[in-house]
Amino acid sequence: MTNNIKIIYKEFKTALNKLKYPDSWFWARYTTNPYSGCGHACIYCDARSNRYYLEQDFENEVIVKSNFDVILEQTIRRSRTLLPDVVGPGGVSDAYQPIEAEIKNTQKLLEVFQKYKFPINIATKSKLITRDIDILQKIAKDTWCTVGFSITSMDQDLVNFLEPFSSPTSERLKALKYIKENAPNIQVGTYFMPIIPFLEDDDDNIEGVIKESKNAGADFILFSPGLTLRDSQANFFIDKLKNSKYKEVVKPILDLFKGKNYPPAQYARKMHSTLYKLANDYKIPIRVKRWIPKDYRKWNYKVSEHLLNEEYIGSVVHGKSNNNMKWAGLNLNNLKESILDVYKRGALKSLDNFNSEVINIVEPFIKNAKDLTKKRGIEHYL
Ligand code: SF4
């Protein structure tokens, strides 16, 4: 099914946004949005909230960014400071929304990223991504490529209501399987988020999504019960529910959220424990394996991944996050020398947020690193 959206062409000055820290879910350090707005028009989409300041009517208009690949290539070529790192296309729009079939902005930008050897992590609800399997495969061979399909329900009637213009769940799973079988270098999996309370959080649905992802060959499943309810996005979603056959869930959802933007911690803890157990039962990793550069950042990224994953598992299993460990892991991404050199100087505790708890985790992790015996200097980690 497609919707009739108005397409507006507009040229923007920037094509790549660098994040201060990577996110520990998708490992993206850069974001890029070849479109503004999204023809998938999911009724819960957070992009409808006021904080994104989208300048168009989200439901009915999509801005196509003209000359996006040209501007992107100029940005990369002219910059002396842009090191290749993971790019997350999309964000508040799906890079493979229906008009991409014709406009090909995403395909063109992938060609640029492939040329300059930037790794990629794409999340989508569309099978259209399989069109670009050759480019994605090249990126995976040169650096790293991850594709995640957002899949949250096995009930297609419900999916038609929540995500009216996306590929059906069965086609997303087919696309996942196709990539797994035809491009084994690509890391492929499922983004099980957001899980809509009282519609998608029952045990049968949770097990169904995990089981079918496993059957399709998923390398990972990332889950989050974090549906948001914010200002205009919340109003739109609740109105849609009220006027549908799912109207009986409106009161329970509002009672659960109690006027807040997120479901309460107690609900998240309960969901995490169910999801964690089932992912373990089906033997699917719950983290995306990170891209590791070959330059001086190599061990900084490895250690950062280790700390951030430890912190995440601790918060999922014990319901308690460890803010200091999280920041120790995040800050490492901005270190301008290798952590191995810091270790050799006996100066780990000089690093931001490296308290004794963090050092006790990091030391055993790096002390047998083969790279430790190499001489100091960036070129020795290449
Ligand atoms: S695919 Fe993503 S960005 Fe597009 S409408 Fe759905 S939730 Fe929003």
Image (tube, grey):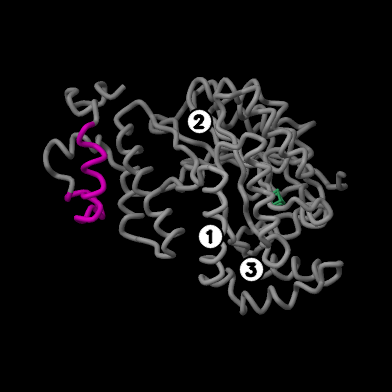
Q: Which of marks 3 and 1 is nearer the N terminus?
A: 3
Number of other residues with Cα within 10 Å of mark 3, as a class: few under 14, some 14 to 19, many 20 or more: many
Hey, what amino acid is under mark 2? Pro
Residue matched to label 2: 119
Q: In this view, does 295 lie to the left or right of 82?
A: left
Magenta stretch holds residue 23: no
Q: Which is more toward the observer, 314 or 27?
A: 314
Residue matched to label 1: 272
On residue 86, the disc is: none
Q: Which is more toward the observer, 238 or 102?
A: 238
Give the percent coordinates (x, y) of residue 352: 25, 52
User: Which residues fall within the magenta stretch?
Assistant: 349-368
Residue matched to label 3: 230
Give the percent coordinates (x, y) of residue 298: 33, 32
Q: Residue at x 19, y 23 (%)?
A: 374
The label nearer to you, 1 versus 2, is: 1
| Mark 1 and mark 2: Cα distance apart in space | 29 Å
Label 1: which secondary element: helix
Q: Which residue is drawn at 71% across and 49% down?
A: 37
Hey, what amino acid is under mark 1? His
Check whether the beta carbons of the residues at disc 2 and disc 3 lie within 8 A of each other: no
Number of other residues with Cα within 10 Å of mark 1, as a class: few under 14, some 14 to 19, many 20 or more: many
Q: Earlier in the sequence, mark 1 or mark 2?
A: 2
Give the percent coordinates (x, y) of residue 99: 78, 38
Q: Which of marks 2 and 3 is nearer the N terminus?
A: 2
Rendered view: 81 above or below 308: above
